[in-house]
Image: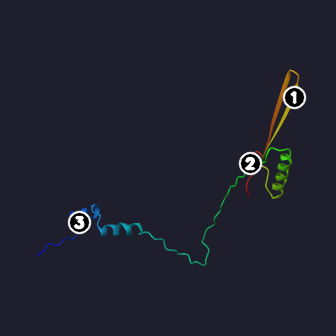
């Protein structure tokens, strides 16, 4: 009479965990795909949630240093204000150079105009 085993023996367990058999590869492959999410919402209805998306775009606009660059900057500034952009910060610089015989003087002023606390998005 043959002896029957109720479970796997030590040889079977070590064979599964240590050997690269084909059936072991099949078991590992099935383990990776064991969790599959089924869609419970019908395709014709909207999902029961809202999405809020915030996107920040930063552009640097540079003008060549020409005699018309300040006028071009002012035109661009006016155009952006007409397109509902808001002013958050402005930086102004003024340089005065005085030159007399034996004395040179350079005065540079920087003025920053900004909204305290920043601009809030609606």
N-terminal-most mark, 2 or 3 = 3
Given residues 87 and 3, the one toward you in this image is: 87
The quarter of the rendered structure image containing the N terminus is: bottom left
Q: CA distance from mark 1 to mark 2?
A: 38 Å
N-terminal-most mark, 3 or 1 = 3
Given residues 9 and 63, the one toward you in this image is: 63
Please determine whether, in this image, residue 2 is positioned above or below residue 68.
below
Q: Is residue 8 left or right of residue 83?
A: left
Q: Disc number at residue 120?
A: none
x, y percent for residue 28? 36, 66
Who's the residue at 85% across and 31% down the image?
Answer: 97
What residue does disc 2 label? 118
x, y percent for residue 116? 76, 45
Please determine whether, in this image, residue 78 is positioned above or below residue 91.
below
Q: CA distance from mark 2 to mark 3?
A: 69 Å
Q: Are marks 2 and 3 in contact (CB under 8 Å)?
A: no
x, y percent for residue 12? 23, 66
Q: Are marks 1 and 2 in contact (CB under 8 Å)?
A: no
Who's the residue at 38% across and 68% down the image?
Answer: 29
The local crowd at label 2, few if under 14, some if 14 to 19, many if 20 or more residues have their Cα within 10 Å, is few
What residue does disc 1 label? 98
Who's the residue at 52% across and 75% down the image?
Answer: 40
Front position among marks 3 and 1: 1
């Amino acid at each position: 009479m043959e002896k029957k085993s109720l479970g796997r023996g030590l040889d079977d367990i070590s064979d599964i965990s240590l050997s690269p058999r084909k059936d072991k590869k099949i078991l590992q492959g099935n383990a990776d795909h064991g969790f599959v999410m089924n869609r419970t919402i019908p395709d014709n209805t909207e999902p029961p949630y809202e999405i809020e998306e915030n996107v920040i775009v930063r552009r640097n606009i540079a003008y060549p240093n020409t005699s018309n660059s300040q006028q071009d900057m002012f035109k661009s500034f006016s155009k952006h204000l007409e397109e509902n952009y808001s002013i958050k910060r402005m930086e102004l610089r003024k340089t005065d150079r005085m030159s007399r015989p034996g004395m040179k003087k350079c005065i540079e002023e920087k003025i920053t105009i900004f909204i305290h606390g920043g601009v809030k998005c609606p």
